[in-house]
Each structure stands twice: as structure tokens, then as C-alpha cells.
Image (tube, rainbow, N blue to C red):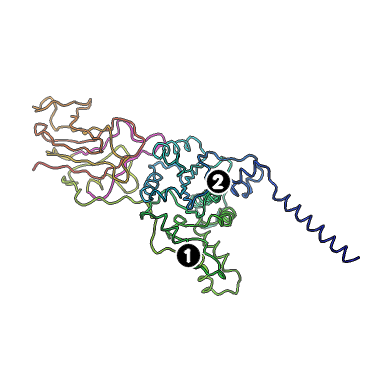
Amino acid sequence: MSKLKLLIAIALLVQIAVFVTWLVSFKPEEEIALEKLGGNAFRFPPHLLYKDNLEFGYISSKNRSDYNIVIGVTTKWHRKGWPLMRLLHSLMENMNQQEREETLIVVFIGEVNMLIVQRIVDELELRHKQHLESGLIDIIAPDRHYFPDLEQLRLQPTDTYALVKQQSKQNLDLAFLMSYARNKGLFYVQLEDHMLSLQPQFVSTMKRFAYIKSALGNPKLPSWFVLDFNAASIAGKLFKCAELPYFINYLQMFYNDMNSLQLLHFFIQTKVCYHQKMSELRCERNMQRYWLKYDTALFGQSMLTKVSSTTTAAVPQTRVLVSSSMSAYQHYILSSVYLGERYYIGRLPAFEELPQPGDVVQFIFQQPTLLRSYIIRSGSTAEPLKRLYNTNVEVRPALEIGALQLANEYNVTEDEFLIVGAFDSRGVAAGMLDASIGALQELRLRIQDFSDHEVLLNEIKLELIE
């Protein structure tokens, strides 16, 4: 009889366990749909526990989930241009058609101001409409309630507030993006908008490396967790989509404590160095098995290429003052391109103020100078949208215009400049100057129309008459 009671008790316990499991796993259809879209990012952080109906601030997707490679790209509003567009251009250039069909690029806009989000979306739709329509690119942005109060972060004595705020927000950006991407494919690759793809067919390279390392792994040892195609940061790291939730939770728990690359290091250390008696050498070996590095970097920082020395200006720089109404980007100043050292990128700092009518690039000669010709090239093969259009080349003669015996008729500006040329559809201005103009006080480029893109100059050559 006692055995029968025991069996009944066991059966009852099993039924209770099944019921509790069902109850815990039960979710209404709306919550299931929400989890498919956003996953853990909507429920785990404490400041989100009591928020209802949290949704994306913006989402554009074809809702496919059968990709081999998902590339997540974090971006935000940059007052100094569109690094995201350079990255996307390099990715497209280095993928063949088959790779594009098996790849999803998810652009995460880390902004909650919908005016800014829409500005970035508009730019993406302008430049990549076909890729959005084909399902190659998804765009997402977080709900305005997603981020905690970033003004109330915890600081250590050696921390700076700006750094802690930056890395905390980046960790939360990654958690949101990974939560969205985890159900979309087989492998996930993290990138940032300031990166560039460095090698053709990088998708096939990454996929092949992942398959080989998975096939050769020892089933008795931990399988790899991350493949590293760029050692400098969290960007360039490849994960298995199925294992992303582990790292997502880690990012959310410790987002205020360290940067994402440090968190990845400590996450893997926690996974494989699992008891105190493990030697440091063994721990390091385990971590190397879990974090495998590819021998060649497939991604790198976006850096402006130096201009060939053949573009060096013929006019000695000491004889001319070079300036612009558009602010330069970092140390890429206008005098540098004039000397043939590197590109100049001109931008205006305010959100609404990209190059506009009346902006100028000036070459003011310290003494009257005779010029034979000029060649000025804008844009580049990699960044064709940064060319100058609707821009005049104007000169101010040393003598008053009324005193000149001009061989040709020229349009004259209100401030007494002769319009001697303009930029063509290739973004190039080139021409010979009429000798009757005589010596010049100044040559300038004057923008005539609004632009949605910054200005990139890569060659300026002014030829003297000796």
C-alpha cells in the first residue's frame, strides 16, 4: 500500500511540475511577438520591469529569419558626416551576389529623438533603397524608454563621467541590437559605423572559418564562443546567434562597469576558468580555445587615405593663406590637402547646417600672383557623394576690374570677383586663366546650392606663371 501511495505522490508531483512549466512558459500572443522582435532587451533591465507596451522607436524589416550571416551595425547622429554610409559602401563592394542573398545587415540607430532617427533613415532610403526593398538591410531604433537615466551612472574614483556614459550607452546599444538579431540567422557579426570592410568576399571567409573551427572542435572541450576578425574593439567579432542571449544578459547586468570588449573578456573568463584552483596558464589556454582569432583583419578603422605626392600644389604654401567657412574634420585641415598630404573634409558643426549657399574655400595670396591654371578635384571613388556640385571658381584681380582690358566677358559678383569656372558632374574644376586678368589677390570656391553631404577635397593644384 505504501508503494502505491508513493507512486501516486510521484505522479502528482510530475503533473504539478508539468503545469508549473506550462504556466511559466505561457505568454500571450502580443508578448510572444514582442520577444521575437526585441527579446531580452525589453524585460531584463530593472528600469524596464514596470513599463508596458514597450516597442521599437522605429523599425523597417522584411521579417526574414533564414540568413547565414547577420551583420549588426551600431550608429548614431554624427555632426561631422556619414561614417555609416562609408561602411555600407565598403560592405556592398566586398560582397558578391550570393553573399548578399544570405546576409542581413541590421542598422541600429542609437537615438531616441525621432527627428534625428528620421534624418538617418531618409539618408539610408536615398542611398540604399534597393537593399532595403530586397531585405538586405533592416533598420531599427529603440523606444524612448529603453535607456536608463544616463545622468545617474555609478562612477569609480578614476572614472570620467563622459567615458562611463559613452561605454554604458554602447553596452545597452549592443544588447538591444543583439536581442533583435539573435533569431535572424546562424551567425552574428558585430560592427560599428566607423569601420570599413578590408577584403573582398569577407562573408564567405568568415563563414568558412566558423564551419572549419566548429568541425575541428573537441567535443569534450568547450566549443568556441567568439571568432575574432578585428582585435581592436568589440567590432569584428562573430558569435553564434543561438548563444547571444548569454552575452546579452552579461551586457545588461554590467553595462555601467566596463566597456564591451572588457565585458566580453570577463564573460569568457567566467565561462572557462570555472574554479579557483585552475592555474593561470590553463585558464589562458581555455580562453584561447573559446576566443579564436583569425590571422588577418577583415575589418579596420575608417581612415582617410593620403593623397599621392603628385598632387602637391605648385604654389609655395608660404605665399598663400588657405581658409574655409566650413570647419575641418579633426586634423585633416585645408592646408594639408593644399600641400598634398591628405584629404580635407569640410563640414559645419550644427545639425541643420551642412554646406550651403555662400560657403567658400579661399586662397588668399600674400602678394599679387600670376596663375596659369588650376585643377581642383572633389570626392573620391569610395565617396562619390562628397563631390562639389553647383560651385563656382572665382578670382579677384589685383587691379580694379574696370581698369582691366579683358579678352573675354566674365560674370562679376557683387564683391568684385570674376567667375572663371565651375565644377563639372565629376566634381572636378579645371581651367586655364586668361592672361588679361593679370595678377590675383584671391581665388575662391563658392558653393551655390544646399548640400546633404560634407565636402571632400582630395587635390588642389595651382600653377604659377614664372
| 393 in relation to 251, above or below | above
Where disc 2 sits, the SS reads loop
Q: Amino acid at mark 1?
A: Lys
Percent across and percent down for residue 354 are: 36, 36
* Residue located beneath label 2 in the image: 151
Identify which residue is drawn at 78% across, 58% down: 14
Percent across and percent down for residue 211 are: 47, 61
Question: In the rendered image, which quarter contains the N terminus?
Answer: bottom right
- Residue 213, numbered circle: 1
Q: Quadrant location of residue 75?
A: top left
Where disc 1 sits, the SS reads helix
For the residue pair 255 and 383, the one nearer the viewer reads as 383
Q: Amino acid at mark 2?
A: Glu
Magenta segment range?
340-364
Q: Earlier in the sequence, mark 1 or mark 2?
A: 2
Identify which residue is drawn at 41% across, 56% down: 204
Is 75 magenta? The answer is: no
For the residue pair 216 and 152, the one nearer the viewer reads as 216
Question: How many numbered marks, from 0 up?
Answer: 2
Percent across and percent down for residue 261 are: 49, 58
Percent across and percent down for residue 337 are: 25, 46
Identify which residue is drawn at 16% across, 37% down: 431
Q: Quadrant location of residue 13?
A: bottom right
Q: Is residue 206 left or right of residue 442?
A: right
Q: Quadrant location of residue 270?
A: bottom right
